[in-house]
Amino acid sequence: MRAPLGIRVLQTLRKEPDWLAMPAEDLDAFRTAENRRRSAPLIRVVTGFPARGVTIHWHELPLPGRSLRIRVYRPANEDAGNPLPVVLHVHGGGFVGTAVQSDWINSHLAARLPAVVVSVEHRLVAAGVPFEAAVADGWDALRHVLDHPAALGVDPARAAVFGESAGGLVAALAAIRARDAGLALRAQVLVNPCVDLTETALDYPSMTEHADSPTLTVPQLRLFRRLAVPEGTDARDVSPLYAGSLAGLPPALVVVPTLDPVADQGRAYTRRLREQGTPAQLTEHAGAPHAFLSMPGVVPHARAARAEITGFLHGRLT
């Protein structure tokens, strides 16, 4: 099955760099240019237009030793005296990406649930910045928002985590840490999640079948893994698939596009959640590529996935 026409057209217009040979300074320049492109108004033709009636603004979280930017989405007509549920979102990309690329899905969730959606502008992996930094940003943001609910007008008893791709890994680990810390999350949503950064990460059949997919390639994944888990670190520490226990976690919705190198990782994580007694719902979107939820303008499947995610969260947060 082929990717949607719009994706194939975009692929022909862009040249794939030699990811594994790219010097650090070139990767930094690529990241800056790509994030600027993802934040440009014209790209909304691809990434989707925000929902009406939702305010979007940047907010700084004061954390010990640093501040962390979050992008906050909230219904404009909310009752200020009635705290809303909160969804902590983590964008995808790994070594590139910004919360802005997810304005479409997050604003529509804020409007339709309704809820306050908080998207974390986490640190991106780079030379000297392992993936543990992004994991810490996701967890610290969740703890801060739930420990200071009045600051954003949210109800900490009605909270969920939601992540895409590498952000799905951050969200999954945040759910595990929340359980261990005694924080009762209501739900977790993992979209085309990457949950295995160990030496087995590239061994799944979907990696071979979709090695050159239009929106994610195996060379990109090799670069991400090399940066994310430098030599000498234990990749299992940032691989939810290998967590000691997945019991007692909030119910999960795992959304898997089938034209995706990491599709089998999402399937494997769903199986392991179920084996450990955590309710897990798997939905697959035939013909959709990786990161499709951030491209509703060219991948029609994104709207169906939005409806699934909205329904799943609405049933658990309201």
Image (cartoon, rainbow, N blue to C red):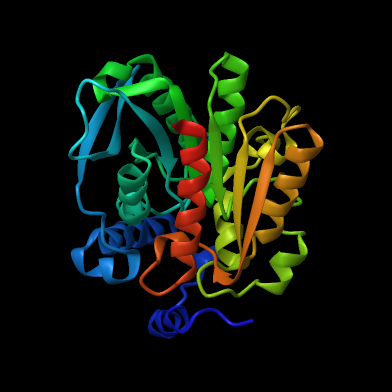
Q: Is residue 72 above or below residue 303?
A: above
Q: Does residue 27 appear in this view?
A: yes
Residue at coordinates 53% horizontally, 29% vertically from top-left? 186
Residue at screen point 26% across, 56% down: 50
Q: How many marks?
A: 0
**Residue 296: percent from the left, percent from the top?**
39, 67
In front here: 304 or 163?
Answer: 304
Residue 297 at x, y percent in the picture:
35, 71
285 in relation to 153, above or below: below
Give 139 or 234, whichever is nearer the viewer. 139
Q: Position of residue 239 (x, y in %)?
A: 66, 39
Q: Is residue 211 left or right of residue 150?
A: right
Instruction: Please state which of residues 209 and 270 is positioned toward the viewer in this rendering.
Output: 270
Quadrant holding the C terminus: top left
What residue is drawn where x is 71% and y is 73%?
Answer: 209
145 vs 262, left or right, is left
* Quarter of the rendering occupied by the N terminus: bottom right
Q: Quadrant of residue 184?
A: top right
In the picture, residue 149 is in which quadrant?
top left
Is 226 positioned to the left or the right of 306 in the image?
Answer: right
Which of 307/295 is in front? 307
Q: Is residue 33 left or right of residue 155?
A: left
- Residue 100: x and y, percent? 29, 52
